[in-house]
Image (tube, rainbow, N blue to C red):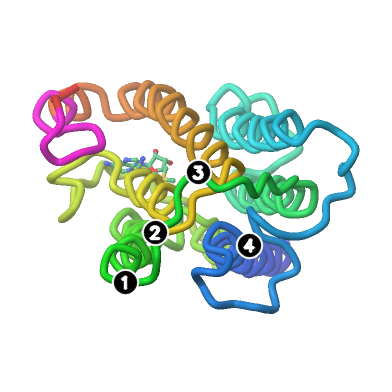
Amino acid sequence: MGLLALVYSVVAYALFFAAFLYLIVFVGGGVTGFAGAPKTLDWGPSPLSDAPAALVNICLLALFGLQHSIMARDSFKRATGKIIPKTVERSTYVLATVGALALLYVFWRPMPQVVWSVPPGVWSGVLTALFYAGFGLVLVTTFLINHFELFGLQQGWLRYRNKELPTPVFRTPSLYRYVRHPLYLGFIIAFWATPHMTVGHLLFAAVWTIYIFIAIGYEERDLIAVFGEKYRDYMAKTPMILPFGRRR
Ligand SMILES: C[S@@+](CC[C@H](N)C(=O)[O-])C[C@H]1O[C@@H](n2cnc3c(N)ncnc32)[C@H](O)[C@@H]1O
């Protein structure tokens, strides 16, 4: 069973990493210069090409949001605890996230009408740099918290070694001293910073941003439940998403 848990966690991690890398290509499209992508936000076929594009896309984003938020809740983990062992709970979450992203990639309906287009030059270079910086921030931040625990690998490894899972640790390393949610800030930057904004890209960025603020509400409720006063103090002293933002 230990080996099975380890293999499961490695497979889930590998698939997730591939899906994350594809997200950069999917959102960035032409900006990434990756010409071989079968589908991006602004280009490619969808099996749902007869349905209204905005409706299809909002449903796909809502599906991702529901999967992500419901499976992250303690009540869901308690309810499924008998069929999903704690050691592979995170890998299962990661695997379901891959599924939700795959549906998004396959069924997304491009809406290529242009909202803004910055001609090649300094400003388009700045926006492209911000796009990559946003994804870079996401990746770096996962290592600040605990990359291998966040994506289930550590749990699979500990199960294989027959060791106990550690209790959650409250961390505020480097960027977490300036904002409480640097990883989500990275996503917001990556999704909005583009020299070529289309209606589909705008919809994607707007819905995802709204979802991030909803998710923060749930996540912070859980963090208060686990870390209590420590997290309340942190909220009082540290802005949510922008370093110069309001506290709490
Ligand atoms: C995808 S990460 C996002 C973290 C954070 N919201 C951000 O944007 O940087 C979500 C996980 O990080 C954990 N987490 C968030 N802030 C934390 C902190 N200060 N210390 C330890 N774990 C934290 C949450 O409990 C959750 O399991």
Does the magenta run of residues contain 235? yes
Please report the bounds of the magenta region as a residue range: 234-245
Instruction: Give the mark, 1 or 4, whose residue is nearer the N terminus.
Output: 4
Q: Residue 121 got which mark? A: 1
| Residue picked out by circle 4 | 19
Looking at the picture, does residue 29 appear above or below residue 98? below
Counting from the top left corner in percent of width and height, residue 243 is at 14, 41
Judged by its main secondary structure, the magenta piece is loop
Crowd band around label 2 with a 10 angstrom C-alpha radius: few (<14), some (14–19), many (20+): some
User: In 3D space, how far apart are the residues under numbered discs 1 and 4 (Cα atoms)?
Assistant: 31 Å
Q: Residue 115 got which mark? A: 3
Instruction: Give the mark, 3 or 1, whose residue is nearer the N terminus.
Output: 3
Q: What residue type is labelled 3?
A: Val
Q: Which residue is drawn at 55% across and 48% down?
A: 114
User: In 3D space, how far apart are the residues under numbered discs 4 and 2 (Cα atoms)?
Assistant: 28 Å
User: In 3D space, how far apart are the residues under numbered discs 3 and 1 (Cα atoms)?
Assistant: 18 Å
Q: Is residue 124 left or right of residue 44?
A: left
The N terminus is located in which quarter? Answer: bottom right
Q: In which quarter of the image is residue 85?
A: top right
SS type, badge 4: helix
Q: In which quarter of the image is residue 242?
A: top left
Q: Which amino acid does label 2 sit on?
A: Val
